[in-house]
Image (cartoon, rainbow, N blue to C red):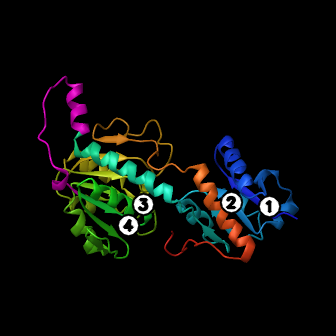
Amino acid sequence: MRPLIPFVHQIDIQEAKDWLNALQVKLPDCDIRLFNQLTEQEREQAELAIVANPASSDVALLPNLKWVHSVWAGVEGMMAELAHMPFDIVRLVDPNLAQTMSEAVLAWVMYLHRDMPGYRAQQALAHWQQQPYVEPADRQIVILGLGELGLKSAARLVENGFQVSGWSRSLKAIDGVPCYAGEQGLAETVGQADIIVNLLPLTAETKGLMNSGFFAELKQGASLINFGRGATIDQSDLISALAEGQLYHAVLDVFAQEPLVSDSELWANPDITILPHISAPTSVNSASVIVAENIRRYLVDGTMPLVVDKQRGY
């Protein structure tokens, strides 16, 4: 009998079917089905599940789970709702995601480096003025979060001539990139920044990390790109830092609540560029290969992929 693997999700039904089809092709010896297609008896058979933003109430109806494999890299929602449950959680680790993120980091660093917000403001006033050019070597970029995404992004920025440093929870060593860790290291590195790129996961330690105290450590006129998680920023403190000129511009791709509500004050703020969570979209094609291979190894010899550390939250 083929192993039964539920696909538990709260995503668009067509997207869910795309995942289901791709995974079924790559795991022909398994029976992969949408959660709502399972009988109560079939739910009890499941030892592992594939998930995409699952409802905790649905997962709770799979009483014999040993582990779940998320098709997304971010798992903070699952940590908040499912960490207390006895099964392991595996997040997606896709090298293609790091490549896509590094492309977005470079693109939006260039947007700030060449002062596109300033030129956009001049256009609105029909004002013709050339701003002085700054060499990339004279622009200091600080990356917060030196996991796979941060490492690839740092390398891409270095290749393009920028001065790059980074901060992470534990100290890393990267050729050509000064690395910092800890509270003192954070203040030291962000104080050098012209542009800060946030790639941190959301944990108890990073929630609200970028607050008034954080912004006070910056040199006046620095800019911020948030491609990590929305709740790592204190929104009211961000708006104050922009209004006071401590922060020049913020590019925001992630928010504590998504989609961003239409009446949010962020939309109309001229010092903020809003993106609809597009910095590093997951590819169904590449991600399904990785998920399928992890599951195949487990079914063959019991080898588990790397699981999320529930204490750290990632």
Q: Which residue is mark 1?
A: 29
Q: Is residue 308 left or right of residue 36?
A: left
First in sequence: mark 1 vs mark 3: 1
Q: Residue at x 60, y 63 (%)?
A: 81
Q: Quadrant of residue 133?
A: top left
Q: Which residues are magenta?
A: 116-140
The residue under label 4 is 146
**In-image side of 71 versus 276 (left or right):** right
User: Of discs 2 and 1, which sits in the foreground?
Assistant: 1
* Residue at (41, 40) in percent of width and height: 264
Under circle 3, the secondary element is helix
Q: Which residue is tagged 3?
A: 149
What is the spatial separation of the Cα atoms under label 3 and label 2, in whole angstroms? 23 Å
Q: CA distance from mark 1 to mark 4?
A: 37 Å
Cα–Cα span, label 3 and label 4: 7 Å
Mark 1: secondary structure: loop
Secondary structure found at label 2: strand
Q: Amino acid at mark 4?
A: Leu
Residue at image position (65%, 67%) is 294
Q: Are marks 3 and 2 in contact (CB under 8 Å)?
A: no
